[in-house]
Image (cartoon, grey):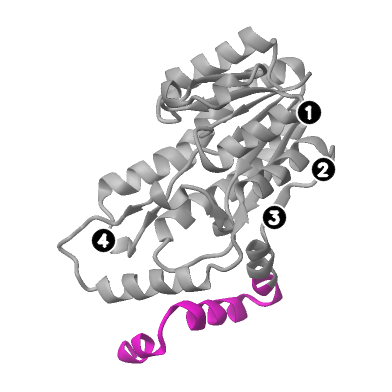
Amino acid sequence: MKTILITGASSGIGKATAKKFAIEGWNVIATMRSPEKENELSQLKNVLVTKLDVQDKASIQEAIKSGIEKFGTIDTVVNNAGFGILGAFEKSTDEQIQNQFSVNVFGVMDVIRAILPHFRKKQDGTIINITSQGGRVTFPTCSLYHSTKFAIEGFSESLSYELLSQNITVKIVEPGSTESNFFNAVGMAADQNITAYEEFDKIALDNWNKNDIMTSTTEEIAAVIYTAATDNKDQLRYMAGRDTELYFGIRNEQDQHYVNYMRKAYIPEILVKQNK
């Protein structure tokens, strides 16, 4: 029986992924910052719910140790934990910038560094990094979030070449808009002294809600993650969601065409004219 460790498993994609693998007969190490609050996954016999905060290296090591002690090994790690900060970049604070990268980039790197000795020792293992459609295409008001996801895309691709030498596989899953609590965990750029972007932020976010019509369920995204973990393919990237396929298709046709599409879809013409 194979074993998977999942970060950010308290809700959303992480929780759906934990359930999916448990149903499919895997041992699951479902990690989260507050495991004492979890009362659903903990009822499953092949699931270990334990603490892991990607900003706490000691908790990462302890979760891996606990998982190996209970199940004997870890075969796959899914780096899912993450959050977003929305709003014009100039309004973001130093603390917000540091925190965004601490969780979405450095947290992923720290989990990978912690599991690699185990994977190298057994010369086997799979790392699945959950990025986003926002790791290859961009939306207004999301510059901080996009920068972290673009970073993980590049990091994962390069890492995949390095780890081939150790028979370790790296894969990327790119979810689109998902019915999860992601937006409940989103923060807004917090510098209240800068008011120049108020109209832009409001219109851009309103247009985002208006255009967000191809939302996937967390179960649909979890199914793609399961495929990535079990298909034995050399494939690096896995698109997840119809909106991801749409935006990637437009972007791949021609880069400027994509930029023009996004400007028309999300930025009112009146604002463009005002700034010419």
Stretch of the chain drawn in magenta: 250-276
64 left or right, relative to 227: left
What residue sits right under mark 3 in the picture? 239
Q: Quadrant of residue 21?
A: top right
First reached walking from the N terminus: tag 3 or tag 4: 4
Residue drawn where x is 84% and y is 42% of the image: 233
What residue sits right under mark 2 in the picture? 234
Pair 2/3: label in front: 3
Amino acid under label 1?
Answer: Asn
- Secondary structure category for the residue under label 4: helix
Amino acid under label 2?
Answer: Asp
| Residue farthest along the top direction in this orientation | 69
- Secondary structure category for the residue under label 3: strand
First reached walking from the N terminus: tag 1 or tag 3: 1
* Cα separation between marks 2 and 1: 12 Å
98 left or right, relative to 226: left
Image quarter (top left, top right, bottom left or bottom right) of the C terminus: bottom left
What residue sits right under mark 1 in the picture? 167
Pair 2/1: label in front: 2
* Cα separation between marks 2 and 3: 15 Å
| Residue farthest along the left direction in this orientation | 193
263 left or right, relative to 153: left
- Secondary structure category for the residue under label 1: loop
Residue 126 visible here:
no
